[in-house]
Each structure stands twice: as structure tokens, then as C-alpha cells.
Amino acid sequence: MTGKEILNKVKEKIGISTAEPDAGKGKSKMSKHITHGYHMVEGKSAHMMEDYVFAQFKQVGDNELGLFAVFDGHLSHQVPIYLKAHLFNNILKEPDFWSDTENAIRRAYRITDGNILDKSQDLGKGGSTAVTAILINCEKLVVANVGDSRAVICKNGKAKQLSVDHEPGTERENIENRGGFVLKYPGDVPRVDGQLAVARAFGDKKLKDHLSSEPDITVEFIDDGTEFVILASDGIWKVMSNQEAVDCIRNIRDTKLAAKRLNEEALNRNSTDDISCIIVRFV
């Protein structure tokens, strides 16, 4: 059985279509001005595509939620697939999601990570970063992340990073307090225990004692100056600054085309990683 056939069987097992498009778009029913689009590009590495996206508007009673996420796997297709199927469900199942959204997200992240570790025999030894954004009634944006996938918002033409890049070099003290170490080998990139180039992630059972899955969370309110938000894997951020990414697509109103244009620019700058990008436009 080929690697792709195995991957498709895993998708079928957890309820994801095996024919996932590499681009798509949608729009809010609550506000005709708010749209989203996404685009994905497989990198030049020897492994299969390890990025996955989730992007949809969902009606929950009288409320509308925009649910957006980029999952960037490492040594794993299965963990990001699992996250795509389960993370938002776990968040929305939290009883105090509406009254205490931030803590509900933190608990759901921990619960989901625990579920992944419990299923490591089926999901494999790898893991995944994640950046998620929940747009509540077109007014409040709640961004959470573990790892180095990133969320950047554009307000009045200026880029503002909403997520935190969880790099081993900057979280060395926490890693060492957990009994781990940070080593710049192989290569010149700081790695947890000399293996993983991010300090926080889902999964990674063998490194979990030294690796956190606690998200950083930022809340941003949508105002008249809010133009759009970018969620993207590090295949973009390795070769572009936040402001360069914003400037690249600011004048492209079609969100799917904007996501594609941003990915193409990353490729033009010799990004070799898998690239996934979601654009949510507010005006």
C-alpha cells in the first residue's frame, strides 16, 4: 500500500473526505462584506503534504461563528488530520465557551492534545502546530496558537501579529525547567532536544515532557479600520515579513485569489516548505 493510500484510509477512518481541494472560499451570512478564501501548495520536501486548513462559517443558535485554522504537521499527516476533524468540536463543546471563551479554548487545546497522545499508536509519533481564529458574530476575533504558524491582521494598511512564534531559542528556560535542552544541531536552528524546531505543538509523544501544548491567545475587535487577517503556515513567514505579506495582497479583494497570490510570492522567494494560507477579509 502506498503512502497516499494509507493517508486516505486514515482520513476515511476519522471522517474527512479524501478529495480535499487545494483552494476554496466562502462568506458570512451575517455580514455580506466578510469573506474568506484559502490556498495550499505542497512543498519541495520528500514527504507528502503535511499542511491542512479548516475554514467555514457556522450558525450556532442565533450566533454566527467563523472558524479558521491552519495545521502544519511534522513527521505526521495523521495529527493535523485529527486536529482538523476534532479541535473546533472540542472547543465548542466547552460549557463556558460563550461566557469565558479564552479559558474554554485553553482547556480544549489541552484535551485535544491528551486525546492525540492517547491515540499515538494510531496517529504516529509526529505532531502538528496550529493557529486558530474564531470570529464571533463578525465582531470579535479570538486567535490561539501553538508553534510557528502565524496570524497577522491588517488595520489601516499596517500589519499586526496576533499570534506568538513559539521558538525553542526564546523558550529555552521553560524547556530546561521541564528537563529538556535546546541544541542548534543538526543545522543552525534551535531544536528541542536537538529534534524539533518549535517549542509548543500538539502530539510529539516522545518529546511531550519537554514540549508544551499551551496556546497563546489574543482577542481583537473588528472595527472600521480592520481590513483582513492572514493565517498561514511558516512556509510564508520564513521568506516574508508581516508587512510584506500584507502589502502583497492588500489590493486583492477576492480572498481565494489573495491567498493564492501570497503563496505564489512565497514560492518566488524560494520557500520550499508546504504552504497553507487563509485570508479573512472584512471590507
Image (spheres, grey):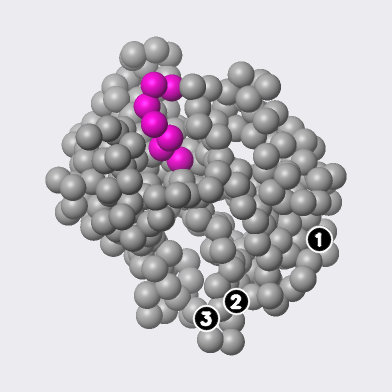
Per the rendering, the mark at residue 127 is none
Q: Which residue is mark 2?
A: 64
Residue type at numbered disc 3: Val
Name the side, left or right, on which 169 lies relative to 54.
Answer: left
Answer few, some or many: residues within 10 Å of disc 1's Cα (few below 14, many 20 plus, some between 14 and 19).
few
- Where is residue 96, by image quadrant? bottom left
Residue 243 seen from this side = no
| C-beta proximity under 8 Å, tags 1 and 3 | no
94 relative position to 257: left or right: left
Residue occupying the point 74% across, 33% down: 244
Percent coordinates x, y for residue 100 in the rendering: 47, 75
Give the residue drawn at x 52%, y 81%: 60
Amino acid type, callout 1 = Val
Q: Nearer the viewer, residue 29 or 244?
A: 29
Taking the view exactly as shown, the residue that stands out farthest to the left is: 121
Examine the rendering and report whether any part of residue 94 can be seen. Answer: yes
- Contact check, label 2 and label 3, Cβ < 8 Å: yes
Is 163 one of the magenta-colored residues?
no
From this view, report whether residue 229 is shown above or below residue 94: above
For the C terminus, the image quarter is: bottom right
CA–CA distance between discs 2 and 3?
6 Å
What segment is highlighted magenta in the picture? Answer: 45-51
| Mark 2 / mark 1, whichever is N-terminal | 2
The CA span between labels 1 and 3 is: 24 Å
Q: Which mark is residue 60?
A: 3
